[in-house]
Structure formats: structure tokens, C-alpha cells
Amino acid sequence: MKVLRLLAIAALVGGAVSSCSQPVGQIGNLPNRPQLIVDDSVAPDFEALARETWAQFLDVFQARSDCFGDVHLHATRTLDSRAAYDPDTATVTVRVPGTPAMLQSALVHEWAHHVEFQCEEQRELRRAFLIAQGLPPDTPWRHDDVSVEMPTSEWAAIPSEQYAEATVALVLGGRPIPTKARITQEAVHVIEVWAGGD
């Protein structure tokens, strides 16, 4: 009888503990998970969209989320391009206003650069990605000076930008805003496998 009582208490305690845990696949604000830090420039509707998109992004990159840190989000009306990433401050700046599709695409594209710059392990996928894109495996990943303005056709040929666009396709299930960057389904798969921890 005493053993049964102890088992019942253990079951109750175990059930209480498990009911406090977060469901599998839900990232939320778990400790040691990268956070999206939004500043005052971001309107509430954009913030809601950004947080929803960040959750999607983390679902895909969950196995690698200990490799990159928090990312900051800033909105502006004066950016020349649709978005930009500053690796020194881990800040994504997005031009507003924009359609939800435009904003989501810009966010995921720049968060892909966040992973690229902040996660040393991202280098592991580059050779396979280049081959999947039909490029020589020794193709330079990006230009040394990324601040130089360049024509869209040149931008679209940079593997780093193709990787960011392939990440958009992976996270959003397609590219809602087409660009001139050519990507292959094999390249999207390379990112998916790496993001899954393989």
C-alpha cells in the first residue's frame, strides 16, 4: 500500500512538472534561445508580424539556435534597399511601410545573414550549397566589401545572397517576393538538412 501511495505521489509530481514545460516545437522565450529584440521604431502591427515570422524561423533553425545569438530589429522609412543587416551590432533594419509578404521576406533574408555572420558552423554548408547551385565549390561566398552599391544582377550572383533567398524559400515555403537570385530546390534542401542539425 505504501508503495502504491509513493507511485501515485510521483505520478502527480511528474504530471505537474511536465504540465509546466513548454510544448515540443514551441520556442517562446526559453532560456538560451536567440531572442528578437525590437526597438521603439517598430510599429505594433509590424512587431506582431516580425515575432510570428521569428517563431517560424526558429522552428526551422531550432537545432542550430545555440550557434547564433539575439538579433535586433529596427524600422526606418529612409533605407535605400528593402532591408539591411549589420553584423557588428546584430541589427536588421527594414524599410517601412511594406506589404506583409515584403516585410516577411526581408526579415527572413536578413536573419539568414545573421546566422551566416554569427554562427561559425554555417561555413559547413557552403561547399554543398555551392555545388547544389551548380557553382564551383571554390566560388567566393561574398565580396570583401559588402557596403559597395552594385547592380541587381551582380547582387543576385553572390552565393551569400542566394543562400539568404534560399532560406526565405525554406522558412516561408516559397519566395513571396521574387528576386533575380536563382536558387535550386537542391540548395534549399542543403540548408534544411544543415538547419536540422545534420
Image (spheres, helix red, strand yellow):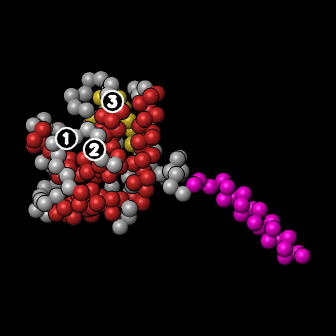
Q: Is residue 43 above or below residue 85?
A: above
- Residue placed under numbered mark 3 in the picture: 99
Q: Is residue 38 above or below residue 20?
A: above
Callout 3, which amino acid?
Answer: Thr
Q: Badges 2 and 3: C-beta atoms under 8 Å apart?
A: no
x, y (%) of residue 146? Answer: 17, 42
Callout 2, which amino acid?
Answer: Arg
- Residue placed under numbered mark 1 in the picture: 179
Residue farthest toward the right in the current orientation of the protein: 1
Q: Badges 2 and 1: C-beta atoms under 8 Å apart?
A: yes
Magenta span? 1-23
- In space, the residues marked 2 and 3 are separated at their CA atoms by 14 Å
- Residue placed under numbered mark 2 in the picture: 175
Question: Is 178 placed left or right of 41 in the picture?
Answer: left
Report the residue at 13% width, 55% height from top. 140
Query: On the rendered image, what quadrant is the C terminus found in?
Result: bottom left
Q: Badges 3 and 1: C-beta atoms under 8 Å apart?
A: no
**Residue 49 in view here:** yes
Query: Which of the 4 image quarters holds residue 120?
Result: bottom left
- In space, the residues marked 3 and 1 are separated at their CA atoms by 16 Å
- Near mark 3 (Cα within 10 A), the count class, few <14, some 14-19 or many ≥20, is few
